[in-house]
Image (cartoon, rainbow, N blue to C red):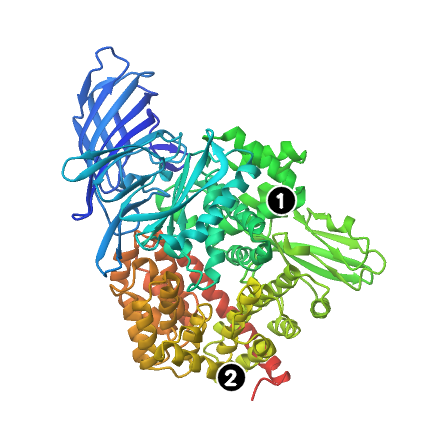
């Protein structure tokens, strides 16, 4: 292997320019046969060619020197594998000279595995209840090598001709359009696809299955013809792709305009895959999705999945330009793909569904997820050195996606969205069909804006963490702003606090002289600012929460901002940011938890869904960490939660009018769930009444699809026993609506009795639960304070089964570790987790394990520091019996 720094990469003696690939999958034996011819440019004299393989057997290897008139060929005299480095080395008797062109002919076989990576099989039941299979691919980051011998690195681009030999009754799909389809022996057909543009191996895809589709086309053109868009699903489910299809048509048109480059391919297929590890994958022209991320039944699906589908489709289509047309040079720059696709995905959803207030939702969801992970010592910079393939999947996380998107949003806001997008167009045009690095992006944005973007953005991408700005008021008209790195532990050593970030302060004043202060930037450790006359009564940093930092006000100023929020002086995103910062500062010890509780006590008249999402997130974290505290304390927290939401739940009721505002629909679902968790007696009673009508009288109208998950949780958490558990299990087994299936699966995790918890745990690993869906089982069991310890014990007892099943599906494996460990809050639990993993090889899941352990340490310190403070606040405010 060549050593580019410490990267584990292939030798540079030859480079592929074109692959001609033929695959013959067997959906009965779950194997496939393949042949390939790779056109090579020889860069150095060589007898040996090394390329990537993993679980592939090369049956024969032949090399032709195309630079010789005789076009002579030679067979490999040695085929040797390095399983650790995932390579095969082919040695030939005659040397290829520098500058020559060669063709490498390979025959190989492989496995259609059930691990959701490489070329794999996915199972489903047809309408008659028969188990059927399709074959599909998932190559990002380094699994093209599981399907064919290849130079499986993002910068080694080539063109591809792909042919699939498949049973004649099945559909065959690949990145490009079909150019020929001919009968083949044995009841098969030979389907040949057009040559791809130059592209990376991880974006190649092909699918074989019994599929049907819905279709439309864009008004925008590719080579003078409309672009054909299709959503494929297993037969009988294709109509559920209509929402995704409509979104895709709008988004493709929008991106072609925004990026200034037409969609580069003649077609765009999107496919629902029954077994899929991630949410979706942006394969060029053949995008694959988890079923819940693309299929939606307007009459029977939960409305929250509508937004998930719209965003996921937008994110994946953004990649068709940002990632596929221009690809990161190496995985260090993954954030260029994911951070940008996240930001521009939100941009597209905001364009198509402006009433969803999606950017404020970003402040509450993605932005907070990025900041929460980046507040850990075990976080990593946005640009993180990646050397070994085992490290790559571990950075597909909230830093690359959400902190990356947050930094882009901050920069776009600072230089102006139009200037920013003009810089993006410059970047894409300059590097199309090639590879780029972060510096290339900064260069294009610098040229467009006239500002040295790299100078102040490098600290954001190359340095771990982000700042908290502590605001003090040394005099009646002056504020002091001091930055330091924010850590959830609150404990900061000198060498952890050496960065001075470039911070656009975004100061909002309660006076007319706002503009000058709105654009002020902090570049040093601290700054004194004199506020204009009359401004001291009301000011707020980080207006609309576009800056990537938290703000720590004095308790008195925080109380004033709480009052301002109650009076309607803060817009929705600022109220979200205020609650989020106060919650995070309480966790870390920068502020008292009582101050946070007093702040949200001001929000009892709040009526915006997104603000309630943030309040719920923070109060849920508090109650979760306090889950083993004395019962009066725990019940006191529930009483406070009950008080907060009581007026709103009574006002909104249980019915969902047609054509209601989307955010009000979402708010009703949320407040019923919160009120149920807070033991509101009227809500519990009504949940049982409706559950009985729904399960015993088959009255679907009694339980709207939006509210079913909340009701399952309320019923099982408040006395529901075997009958209720079995009723939810029956729904899981019988419903054909994919989002309702996982809603029921999550619901089972809220059982309170020991025997039912055991059943829920065992069911999560049964054949009835798809491997990809274990996360839904675990999320309920983790949240449920009665089953949390049972879940961790179950994982320990079944470690071998879990490891064998998930060790190749590493994002699911990381989530399994996280869900089973990171909600504890004691030193004993930290020791138990460390002891359990002490004799295990943790290389493939080291980051999620470190992050989980650190979360437990943070929880433990928070509880030890503030349990007395919380008790005193509850008593002083009448919530303790």
Classify residue 704 as left or right of residue 113. right
* Residue nearer the viewer, 383 or 274: 274
**Label 1 crowd bin: few (<14), some (14–19), many (20+), radius 10 Å:** many
State if disc 2 and disc 1 touch (CB < 8 Å).
no
Residue projecting furthest to the top? 69
**Label 2 crowd bin: few (<14), some (14–19), many (20+), radius 10 Å:** few
Image location (x, y in percent) of residue 590: 61, 65
The residue shown at (31%, 52%) is 234
Q: CA distance from mark 1 to mark 2?
A: 48 Å
Q: Tell me the residue that label 1 is attached to.
A: 411
The residue shown at (50%, 41%) is 252
Residue 799, quarter of picture? bottom left
Mark 1 vs mark 2, foreground winner is 2
The residue shown at (39%, 74%) is 750
Q: Quadrant of the C terminus?
A: bottom right
Residue 456, quarter of picture? top right
Residue 114 visible? The answer is: yes
Residue projecting furthest to the right? 533
Q: Quadrant of the N terminus?
A: top left
Q: Tell me the residue that label 2 is attached to.
A: 682
Image location (x, y in percent) of residue 360: 60, 57
Could you say whether the residue bearing mark 2 is in a helix, strand or loop? helix
Circle on res. 53: none
Classify residue 356 as left or right of residue 720. right
Residue projecting furthest to the left? 186
């Amino acid at each position: 292997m060549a050593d580019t720094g410490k990267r584990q990469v292939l030798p540079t003696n030859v480079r592929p320019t074109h692959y001609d690939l033929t695959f013959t999958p067997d959906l009965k034996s779950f194997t496939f046969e393949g042949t390939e011819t790779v056109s090579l440019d020889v860069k150095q004299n060589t007898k040996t060619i090394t390329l990537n393989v993993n679980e592939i057997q090369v049956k024969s290897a032949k090399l032709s020197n195309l630079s010789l008139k005789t076009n002579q060929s030679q067979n490999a005299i040695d085929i040797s594998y390095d399983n650790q480095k995932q390579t095969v080395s082919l040695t030939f008797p005659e040397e290829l000279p520098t500058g020559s062109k060669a063709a490498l002919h390979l025959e190989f076989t492989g496995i259609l595995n059930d691990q959701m990576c490489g070329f794999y099989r996915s199972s489903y039941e047809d309408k008659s209840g028969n188990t059927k299979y399709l074959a599909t691919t998932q190559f990002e980051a380094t699994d093209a090598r599981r399907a064919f011998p290849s130079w499986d690195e993002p910068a080694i681009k080539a063109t591809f001709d792909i042919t699939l030999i498949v049973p004649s009754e099945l559909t065959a799909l690949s990145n490009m359009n079909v150019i020929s389809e001919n009968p083949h022996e044995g009841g098969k057909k030979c389907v040949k696809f057009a040559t791809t543009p130059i592209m990376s191996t991880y974006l190649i895809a092909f699918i074989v299955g019994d599929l049907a589709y819905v279709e439309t086309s864009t008004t925008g053109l590719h080579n003078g013809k409309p672009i054909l868009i299709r959503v494929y699903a297993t037969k009988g489910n294709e109509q559920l792709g209509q929402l995704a299809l409509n979104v895709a048509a709008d988004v493709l048109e929008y991106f072609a305009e925004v990026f200034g480059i037409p969609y580069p391919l003649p077609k765009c297929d999107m496919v629902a895959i029954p077994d899929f590890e991630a949410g979706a994958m942006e394969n060029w022209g053949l995008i694959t999705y988890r079923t819940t991320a693309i299929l939606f039944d307007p009459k029977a699906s939960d409305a929250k999945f509508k937004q998930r589908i719209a965003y996921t489709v937008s994110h994946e289509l953004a990649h068709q330009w940002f990632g596929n047309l221009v690809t990161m040079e190496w995985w260090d720059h993954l954030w260029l793909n994911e951070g940008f696709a996240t930001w521009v995905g939100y941009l597209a959803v905001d364009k198509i569904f402006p009433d969803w207030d999606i950017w404020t939702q970003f402040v509450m969801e993605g932005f907070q997820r990025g900041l929460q992970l980046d507040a850990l010592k075990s976080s990593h910079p946005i640009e993180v050195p990646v050397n070994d393939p085992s490290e790559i999947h571990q950075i597909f996380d909230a830093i690359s996606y959400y902190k990356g998107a947050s930094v882009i949003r901050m920069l776009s806001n600072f230089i102006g969205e139009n200037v920013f997008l003009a810089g993006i167009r410059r970047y894409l045009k300059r590097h199309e069909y090639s590879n780029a690095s972060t510096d290339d992006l900064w260069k294009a944005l610098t040229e467009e804006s006239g500002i040295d973007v790299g100078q102040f953005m490098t600290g954001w991408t190359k340095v771990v963490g982000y700042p908290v700005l502590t605001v003090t008021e040394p005099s009646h008209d002056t504020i002091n702003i001091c930055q330091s790195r924010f850590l959830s532990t609150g404990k900061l050593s000198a060498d952890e606090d050496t960065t001075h970030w470039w911070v656009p302060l975004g100061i909002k004043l309660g006076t007319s002289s706002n503009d000058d202060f709105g654009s002020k930037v902090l570049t040093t450790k601290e700054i004194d600012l004199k506020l204009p006359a009359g401004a001291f009564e009301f000011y707020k940093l980080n207006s609309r929460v576009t800056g990537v930092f938290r703000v720590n006000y004095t308790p008195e100023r925080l109380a004033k901002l709480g009052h301002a929020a109650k009076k309607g002086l803060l817009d929705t995103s600022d109220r979200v940011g205020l609650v989020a910062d106060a919650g995070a500062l309480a966790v870390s010890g920068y502020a008292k938890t009582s101050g946070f509780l007093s702040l949200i006590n001001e929000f009892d008249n709040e009526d915006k869904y997104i603000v309630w999402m943030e309040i719920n997130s923070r109060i849920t974290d508090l109650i979760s960490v306090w889950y083993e505290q004395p019962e009066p304390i725990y019940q006191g927290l529930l009483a406070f939660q009950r008080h907060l939401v009581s007026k709103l739940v009574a006002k909104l009721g249980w019915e969902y009018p047609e054509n209601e505002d989307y955010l009000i629909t979402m708010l009703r679902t949320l407040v019923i769930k919160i009120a149920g968790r807070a033991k509101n007696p009227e809500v519990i009673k009504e949940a049982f009444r409706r559950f009985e009508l729904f399960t015993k009288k088959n009255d679907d109208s009694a339980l709207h699809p939006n509210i079913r998950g909340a009701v399952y949780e309320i019923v099982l958490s408040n006395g529901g026993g075997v009958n209720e558990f079995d009723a939810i299990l029956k729904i899981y087994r019988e419903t054909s609506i994919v989002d309702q299936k996982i809603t029921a699966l999550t619901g089972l995790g809220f059982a309170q009795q020991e025997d039912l918890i055991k059943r829920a745990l065992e069911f999560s690993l049964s054949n009835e639960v798809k491997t990809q869906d274990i996360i839904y089982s675990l999320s309920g069991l983790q949240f449920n304070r009665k089953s949390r310890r049972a879940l961790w014990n179950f994982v320990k007892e079944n470690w071998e089964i879990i490891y064998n099943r998930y060790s190749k599906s590493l994002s699911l494996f990381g989530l399994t570790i996280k869900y089973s460990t990171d909600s504890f809050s004691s030193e004993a639990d930290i020791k138990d987790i460390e002891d359990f993993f002490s004799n295990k090889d943790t290389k493939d899941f080291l980051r999620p394990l470190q992050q989980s352990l650190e979360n437990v340490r943070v929880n433990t310190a928070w509880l030890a520091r503030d349990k007395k403070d919380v008790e005193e606040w509850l008593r002083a405010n009448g919530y303790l019996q």
